Structure formats: C-alpha cells, structure tokens
Image (cartoon, grey):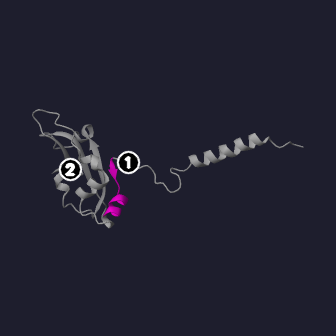
Amino acid sequence: MRTPPPALSRFAIISLALFANLGCHPASVGQSATRNSNVITAAEIEQQRQAGVRDLYELVQLRRPRWFQLRTDRSLKLETTILVYHGEARLGGVEVLQGYALMGVSSLRYLDAAQAGLLPGAGSVHVQGAIVITMGQIP
C-alpha cells in the first residue's frame, strides 16, 4: 500500500498547478490584455466614436497624445514634423486629422522616425514620426 505524500508536497503540487494555470491566460480576470502603444485598434475607434469623439485628431489626442509630441528641431535647415499617411499616400501633417471622420477607419498606427523615413514623400522635412490610417474593408 502506498503512503500519501507529506502535506508540504501536496501544497507544492497544488501551487504549481495553480501557477501553471494562471500562466495560460493572457490577463487576470477583470484586466484587458496589454495594448500596443503604437496602434489604435478598430475596437478602440468604435468605442470612442460611441463616446462622442468627433474626428481622428481628437481620438489621437485622447488615446495616444504622445503621438503628437514633437521633441525639438533636429535639423537646422529642415522642419521637424509628424506626417499623416493613408496607406502610402502622404496627406500632410497632423492637422489633416481634424475633421477626418472615424467611420470606416479600421486602425491607426504610429511609426517612429526610422520607420516613417521609409515612406514616400518625406524628403522636404525632418520626419519625427508618422501616423498611418488604415481603412476597413467595404462589404
């Protein structure tokens, strides 16, 4: 006949099982998964639209204000700016987000200077970053 394990061993086995189970879940109960600070998702856009947000400028100002922060001029000859793109088409600076409706936008993504520098049309300014608008699929 087999003898039962000591109480300490049972406690260790139960603890390991509980910790292993917690590791399988992306977030604790009542908490959301970690958000990407460089993306505003369709769910966030819809939530803010329902809350009365009027345009993409206000959305970014509320959800990711860091995207609008210019550090300082890095070049003596070129303006430092944050550009806005729809796909790979340059729309202008962040002011183009004013009046740009949330309807149809599936996500916004912030690109740092290195990534933004790879986009077309940024040659006349020093680009600190870019906000890329992605539109949803039309059914």
In the image, is residue 60 above or below residue 129?
Answer: below
Q: Residue at x 16, y 53 (%)?
A: 95
Earlier in the chain: of badge 1 and badge 2, it is 1
Q: What residue type is labelled 2?
A: Val
Per the rendering, the mark at residue 139 is: none
At label 2, counting other C-alpha atoms closer than 10 Å, the crowd grade (few under 14, some 14-19, many 20 or more) is: many
Counting from the top left corner in percent of width and height, residue 132 is at 25, 50
Q: Which residue occupies the foreground of this view, 79 or 85?
A: 79
Q: In this view, does 87 lie to the left or right of 41?
A: left
The residue range painted magenta reads 38-48
Q: Mark 1 = which residue?
A: 36
Q: Is residue 80 left or right of residue 20?
A: left
Counting from the top left corner in percent of width and height, residue 42 is at 35, 59
Number of labelled discs? 2
Q: Is residue 30 left or right of residue 112?
A: right
Give the mark toward the camera: 1 or 2.
1
For residue 139, say whether it is visible. no
At label 1, counting other C-alpha atoms closer than 10 Å, the crowd grade (few under 14, some 14-19, many 20 or more) is: few
Residue 1 falls inside the magenta stretch: no
In the image, is residue 12 above or below residue 58?
Answer: above
Q: Mark 2 = which residue?
A: 84
Label 2: which secondary element: strand
Q: Which residue is drawn at 26% across and 54% down?
A: 61
